[in-house]
């Protein structure tokens, strides 16, 4: 069964548009499409696919990026990247 996240106000009612009643209108920004995906697995393929994503998102970082893998969760893995 798929899990979904729903914004719920403190009174337990979800507004029809999913935003809090007092939310200020936001400027609309386009989200860039990056035709890449992260491939987990062994460290080499994980770092290579993460570097490709970072190069697309933050080209100013260059190719000298350090990665740190956090595996404390049962099924989740977080990958930290920093230049």
Image (spheres, grey):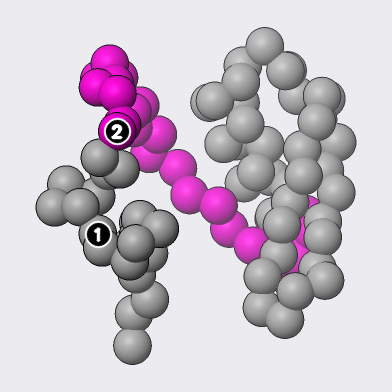
| Front residue of this view, candidates 17 and 40 | 17
Image-based side of 7 in relation to 62, left or right: left
Q: Position of residue 13 (x, y in %)?
A: 26, 63
Asked if the magenta segment contains residue 35, the reply would be yes
| Front residue of this view, candidates 49 and 3 | 3
Residue drawn at the location 16% of the way across and 47% of the way down: 17
Above or below, comparing residue 21 to residue 44 in the picture: above
Residue drawn at the location 29% of the way across and 33% of the way down: 22
**Residue 80 occupies which quadrant of the picture?**
top right
Q: Which mark is residue 75?
A: none
- In the image, which residues are magenta? 22-45
Q: Which mark is residue 22?
A: 2
Q: Position of residue 30 (x, y in %)?
A: 28, 22
Q: Is residue 78 visible?
A: yes
Image-based side of 78 in relation to 26, left or right: right
Residue drawn at the location 30% of the way across and 43% of the way down: 20
């Amino acid at each position: 069964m798929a899990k979904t996240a729903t914004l719920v106000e403190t009174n337990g009612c979800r507004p029809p548009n999913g935003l809090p009643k007092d939310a200020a209108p936001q400027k609309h920004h386009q989200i860039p499409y990056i035709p890449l995906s992260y491939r987990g697995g062994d460290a080499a393929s994980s770092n290579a696919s993460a570097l490709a994503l970072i190069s697309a998102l933050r080209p100013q970082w260059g190719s000298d990026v350090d990665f740190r893998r956090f595996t404390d969760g049962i099924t989740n893995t977080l990958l930290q990247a920093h230049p």
